[in-house]
Image (spheres, rainbow, N blue to C red):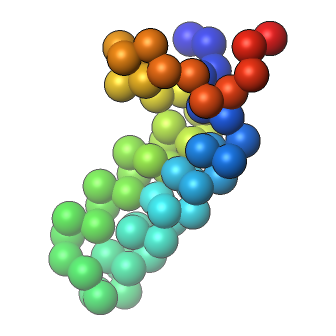
Amino acid sequence: MNANIGTIDRSLRIVIGLLLIGLSLSGVIGWWGWIGVVPLATGIFSFCPVYRLLGIRTCKRG
């Protein structure tokens, strides 16, 4: 499992994931806010399976 998510993409995924989960926990949005777990996990692991299927890489090859 090689990283395919760059720094900016990774940061945005983590922030959006935490924001959605936080809004869901506080009751501002419904249970669907838990979908934030997906961008949070892909940001933490720097790997997105959908990017791999589509051949997308936002990180530098190394």
Where's residue 43, x and y in %? 57, 42
Q: Image quadrant of residue 29?
A: bottom left
- In the displayed structure, would residue 4 be above or below residue 19? above
Q: Position of residue 61 (x, y in %)?
A: 74, 13
Task: Please identify the quarter of the rendering in which residue 6 is found.
Answer: top right
- Is residue 41 shown left or right of residue 62? left
Quadrant where the C terminus is found in the figure: top right
In the rendered view, does 46 fall on the left or right side of 39?
right
With 37 as the anchor, is 15 left or right in this view? right
Residue at x 29% of width, y 88% of height: 28
Can see residue 8? yes
Q: Position of residue 18 (x, y in %)?
A: 51, 65
For the point 58% across and 55% down, the residue is: 12
Q: Position of residue 46 (x, y in %)?
A: 61, 32
* Residue 56 to residue 32: above or below: above
For the image, the number of numbered tags is 0
Q: Nearer the viewer, residue 24 or 55?
A: 55
